[in-house]
Amino acid sequence: MIHDTKNVGKPTVLTCRFPTFYGCLLHKDVTLEKLAAKYDYNRNYLSNLFKREVGDTFSNVLTKQRLMKANILITSTNLPVSKIIKEVGIKNRTFFYKKYISLYKVAPSSSRKETLR
């Protein structure tokens, strides 16, 4: 899950007003616009609230959450990476590989090989 290191253990506006908010992040079609509409908030307000409470942009956090889920699938299943990319809701394969390598410092295939040793 997402943790605000400044307020660890303290309830935040996001968790108080939107108790299922973090669970929504891995839904394939989630966007800030859809979440703002779902909770009847202005998109810009929700974006600023997210940045203030989490310490990163919604887009960055969503991408990291999806990459973490992808990494779990890569290291614990034999699913092809192409299927995993779709499963976690990332639409662009090149974007996925670039972000995955940036976060984990290895390609997905190397992550899988490391866990098989």
Image (tube, rainbow, N blue to C red):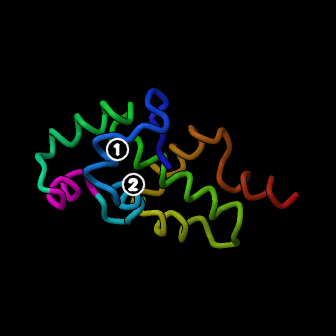
For disc 2, the neighbor class at 10 Å (few under 14, some 14 to 19, many from 20) is: some
Q: Residue furthest top?
A: 6
Residue 85, image x and y in percent? Answer: 50, 63
Residue 71, image x and y in percent? Answer: 62, 55
102 is higher (above) or lower (below) than 26:
above
Left or right side of 13 for 96? right
Find numbered disc 1 in the image and state the secondary structure of the residue it sits on: helix
Residue 71: numbered disc: none
Residue positioned 49% across, 34% down in the render:
8
98 or 65, which is in the foreground?
65
Residue positioned 52% across, 44% down in the render:
98
In the picture of the structure, the residue carrying the numbered disc 2 is: 22
In contact (CB < 8 Å): disc 2 and disc 1:
no
Find numbered disc 2 in the image and state the secondary structure of the residue it sits on: helix
For disc 1, the neighbor class at 10 Å (few under 14, some 14 to 19, many from 20) is: few
47 is higher (above) or lower (below) than 40:
above
In the picture of the structure, the residue carrying the numbered disc 1 is: 59
63 is higher (above) or lower (below) than 75:
above
30 is higher (above) or lower (below) than 50:
below
Residue positioned 22% across, 34% down in the render:
48
Residue 32 is one of the magenta-drawn residues? yes
Q: Residue furthest front?
A: 10
Residue 10, image x and y in percent? Answer: 42, 37
Distance Cα–Cα, label 2 vs label 1: 13 Å
30 or 108, which is in the foreground?
30
* Quadrant (top left, top right, bottom left, bottom right) of the C terminus: bottom right
Left or right side of 2 for 45? left
Kindly indicate the quadrant of the structure image that contains residue 55. top left
Left or right side of 112 for 84? left
* Segment tinted magenta in the rendering: 31-39
Q: Earlier in the sequence, mark 2 or mark 1?
A: 2
At label 2, which amino acid type do we have?
Tyr
